[in-house]
Amino acid sequence: MSIPKPLILDDASIKIGTTEGATTLVELACVANHVELSPDVSTTTLDTMCGSVDYPGTVKWSLIATLYQSFDAGATEETLSAAVAADGPVPFEIMGYKSQPVSATNPMWSGEVIPQPYSPINGDAGDASTVDLEWSVVGEPTKSTTPLP
């Protein structure tokens, strides 16, 4: 058995959609510092005379990211403000290796997120301004291991 290769996030992809006319996915990898697709499982506890039992509840997914703010065309501010202005869900895609095709060893997760207002300028003197996102995913993200058409 070979030794598994860990995913090092130095070639990851995070794309967020805008809806200016036709939907466009914009690659934000070069301004991304953190990316996370996170499930939050609520727990329902039933207390009876025989004790308490926890049951898994609904699962809510979130796309969590830290991006460096950039006012350049096609970068952070333009993309995020267009997503928020869409006033509804926009598509997203994330994957471990943007320089490799989607495959069993480089899966892609996609779906739709609900854009929320964000802090457009955030940071300390002398540091880069960051934008922290935690946007809800509509339903469950889709995992793809074959390239999409």
Image (cartoon, rainbow, N blue to C red):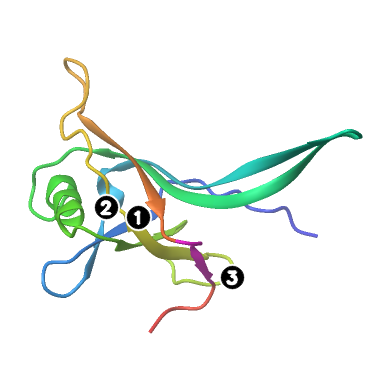
Q: Which of pointers 1 and 2 lies earlier in the amino acid sequence? A: 1
* Badge count: 3
Find out whether residue 65 is within the magenta segment: no
Left of 43 or right of it: where is 120?
A: left
Q: Which residues are magenta?
A: 139-144
Identify the residue position indicated by label 2 in the image. 28
At a point 14% along the width and 49% down the height, the residue shown is 81
Q: Amino acid at mark 2?
A: Leu
In the displayed structure, would residue 147 be above or below residue 6? below
Asked where in the image residue 71 lies, by quadrant, the reply is top left
The picture quadrant where one finds residue 41 is top right
> Mark 1 falls on what kind of element?
strand
Residue bearing mark 3: 104
Q: Residues within 10 Å of mark 3 (few under 14, many from 20)?
A: few
| Tag shown at residue 14 | 1
Instruction: Kindly identify the residue that appears in the image at 20 percent across and 56 percent down.
Output: 83
Residue 64 image position (x, y, % from top left) = 40, 43
Task: Describe the element under mark 3 as helix, strand or loop.
Answer: loop
Hey, which residue is sitting farthest bottom in the picture? 149
Q: CA distance from mark 1 to mark 3?
A: 18 Å
Residue 108 image point, x, y percent: 47, 65
